[in-house]
Amino acid sequence: MNISERLANLHASPIPVVTDEIIREDLWRGRMALKRSRLRRGVGGLGFAFVVAASVTLMVRAPGSGFEHRTTNDGVGGAQQSEAVRLVAYAGKQLPGFKVDRVPEGFVLQGSTSSSLVLARQGEQSPVQFFVDKILVSLQSADVESLGDGVDVTVKGSPGVISQNEGTRMLQCNDGKNSLLIQVWSGIELTDSQIVSFAEGISVTSEAIAPAG
Amino acid sequence: MNDAMSARDIEYENFVRLRRAAMLRSAMLLADGDLHLAEDLVQVTLIRLYMKWPRVRKMNVDAYARRVLVNNLMDHYRKPSVRRECRVSDVPDSTATSPDLLSGVGDSVEDQPIVSALAKLPPRMRAAVVLRYVEGLDVEETAHALGCSAGTVKSQASRGLEKLRGHLEIPSGERAGCANSASSV
């Protein structure tokens, strides 16, 4: 058999059936993305008007005649750093693999696997493997050596880095024993210091298994 | 969210039911045999399809999906974090998979040596070979998916085949025999 035939045979490999569950999840993701897109477009016009008004106000109130650059943000990528959400002690049922001391108010533990934990708002109906508008705690492979680029923080005395991608913030930290990634979806208004505090309230238990590779 | 199915939902669902598994298989071959990356690429592609469905449904949906998939893949390889990855010369015989998530797609590919050899090709060359020889697209269709000229597809696919033969250590006799078919790329 020559190489072209071998390549063509890859296409002839049997295809597994796509289950209704997978299709339902694809549909859900599509709907959510469309909803977010429409929301952004709707808010965009209002946001522009707000930004113009705020800029004018700042310029008028600035001392002297020159324009003064000022910022109220001290976090990653301009994330709003006022404490819009409180961290509260968590008294609910713990899930295997992780022990959580505090959660953002209104959030519950939605589900866990051997290497991850998902927190969602109370009443959230989406499947646990969707991370939109949720907080993901993920145990990383021991092979992950670099914490990546971002703002350096300290978690339980160990180094950590908070980075941001399209509004979603990620804290990576490593205490020498476990490497954790905490992903806070865009729109969940925790400050960087609250994310660190949340991370410090997480303990990895013996039931958790770090992925390999 | 309203759970009522719109016309968009019904058409989209039918497309996903018919085409998702094949998309995942193509994505896996395009993505170094990495099933998890392939699943991500397919999910992102399907989201894009859903959002653009009113326009896409009037077009060749498969061609559009392929184009989006390839663009997503190239975007992935352009990420600095991916470029920093340490690449090894030997590809593992098989990739660890999550059966629940990935529905055993990787298991259905029997010829693992050629999958491993494909993974050694540069991304665009691999894409040209997969679309041209695995998917069976013609040169123009492949060029559309890759966003390049027909001439580029011909040269990339031809060189890709030659590299595959090298990686698979195919004897020179067969190489010579295949050179003719390669010239008709």
Image (cartoon, rainbow, N blue to C red):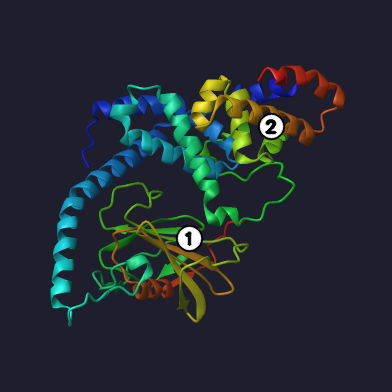
Residue under label 1:
A138
Q: Position of residue B38 (x, y in %)?
A: 53, 40
Q: Residues within 10 Å of mark 2 (few under 14, many from 20)?
A: many
Quadrant (top left/top right/bottom left/bottom right) for the N terminus of chain B: top left
> Residue visible at 14% across and 68% down?
A56
- Label 1 secondary element: strand
* The one of A97 and B166 positioned closer to us in this rendering: B166
Q: Tell me residue A180's x, y (percent).
A: 50, 66
| For residue A103, above or below residue A36 | below
Determine contact: label 2, label 1, CB under 8 Å: no
> How far from the left and from the top, in percent, is residue A67?
22, 74
Per the image, the residue denoted by label 2 is B160
* Circle 2: element type: helix
> Viewed as shown, does residue A62 lie left or right of A10?
left
**Which chain is indicated by disc 2?**
B
Q: Is residue B127 above or below residue A181?
A: above
The amino acid pointed to by label 1 is Ser
Residue B145 point in image, percent of width and height: 50, 29
Q: Are marks 2 and 1 on the same chain?
A: no
Give the mark toward the camera: 2 or 1: 2
Quadrant of the rendered image containing residue A70:
bottom left
For the residue marked with disc 2, what is the amino acid?
Answer: Gly
